Amino acid sequence: MKEFFETYGGAVLSTTFDKYCYVNVRHLPRFFDYSTELCYSQTERVTSINDIRHPAIRNAMKMLDMHEIRLTYEADLPARSGLGTSSSFAVGMLNAFYALKGKYADKKKLADEAIYLERVLCNEAGGWQDQIAASFGGFNRINFNADGYEVLPVIISPERKNQLNDNLMMFFTGFTRFSSDIQKANAVGQKDKISQLREMYQLVDEAERVLTDKTADLDEFGRLLDHTWKLKRQTGSAVSTNSIDELYKKGIEAGAVGGKLLGAGGGGFLMFYVQPERRASVMEAMKDLLYIPFEFEDGGTRVIYYSPESYTPAEEEK
C-alpha cells in the first residue's frame, strides 16, 4: 500500500501461475448504430466513451485515445476473488490497446500505467503488486519505497521451486468481494496496524532466505505463511470472516503447516502449505470447497495473436 511503503518501505514475494485472462480488441466495423462494443460479465454497446459503465475500460480508452473498438474479455478465474484478476485485466487491456495502435509498451510502462489507471483514474484503494506481477511475470521479490519499486527475480533451483509448488494447495471459498471495499473498510484506524505491517515487511527477508537457501527446511515457509496470516488478521475486521476462520482452522487441524487467504480478504481463495503425506487429509477436510490445482509460470502479459488493422478515425474519412 502506497500510504505505508512511502514512509516505511515495503516488499512482497510474488509469483504468476497458470491461470489466465484473455483480452481481445479490434476495431468495430461501422455497420452498427453504436461505435463501441464491450463483452465481459455484461455487454455494453455505446456511441460515447463517457457512457461506458465499466470504469477501467472507460478510463483506459480515454487515457490511450481509443475509439470504435470491440473488446471481449474472458478469464480462467472469477473476478473479485483475490488473485489479481482486475489488475491482470487492466495490464492485458493496455497491452492490447497498444498493440492495436501498432505500438510496443515494455513491462515497466504497462505496470506503471495499470497502477495509474486503477489507483488514480478509477480511484480504487489497493496495493501495486498485482499490476507489477501481471506485467513482469515470474517468481519475484518486489521492493517498494518512496521512489517507486524494483522487481528482483527470486533465485531458486527448479527442484526447490517444484517442491514448493507441490506443497501448496489452493481452494475456492466461494465468497467474492471487491478488493477496494475491503481496503477502505480496513483503512479505519490505520495507525494501529503499523507494527503488524512492519513485522510482515520484515518477514519477507526471512521467507526469501528459506526459499533460496538449499539447506533451509522448506516447511519453514509454511510456518511463516501461518505467522503472516495471523498478523494480517489483526490489520482489519474485514480481512476474514467467521466462515473463513473456521475453514482455515480445519485445514491446519488436518495437517497443513500454514496458509493464508489470498488477496485483500473477505473471501476468495484459501492457500495452504501442506507436506505431501498430509495432502489427502487436507483434501478431505476441504471437500466442500473447489480444489484448484495450479503450476507456477514465468510469463507476464503477452500478445498471443496480432494482426495489423487499417483504421482511419471517422472524422478524418472525409
Image (cartoon, rainbow, N blue to C red):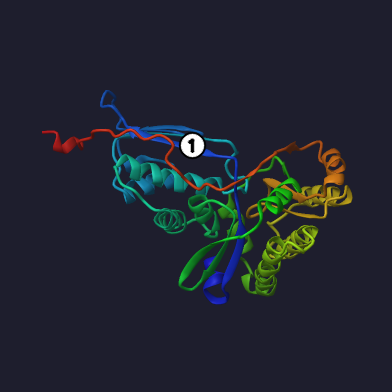
Residue at 23%, 35% in the rendered image:
311
Whether residue 141 sits left or right of residue 169 in the image: it is left
Whether residue 241 sits left or right of residue 80 in the image: it is right
Say how many tags the image has.
Answer: 1
The residue where tag 1 is placed is 22
- Of the pair 204 and 120, the residue shown nearer to us: 204
Label 1 element class? strand
User: With respect to residue 42, does 87 lie above or below?
Assistant: below
Mark 1 Cα shell of 10 Å, populated few (<14), some (14-19), many (≥20): some
Q: Position of residue 111 (x, y in %)?
A: 45, 55
- State the image quarter where residue 203 is shown: bottom right
Residue at 40%, 55% in the rendered image:
113
Residue at the left extreme of this rendering: 318
Looking at numbered disc 1 in the image, what kind of residue is underneath it? Tyr
Residue at 34%, 48% in the rendered image:
104
- Of the pair 130 and 212, the residue shown nearer to us: 212
- State the image quarter where residue 11 is shown: bottom right
Q: Position of residue 141 (x, y in %)?
A: 58, 62
Screen quadrant of the C terminus:
top left
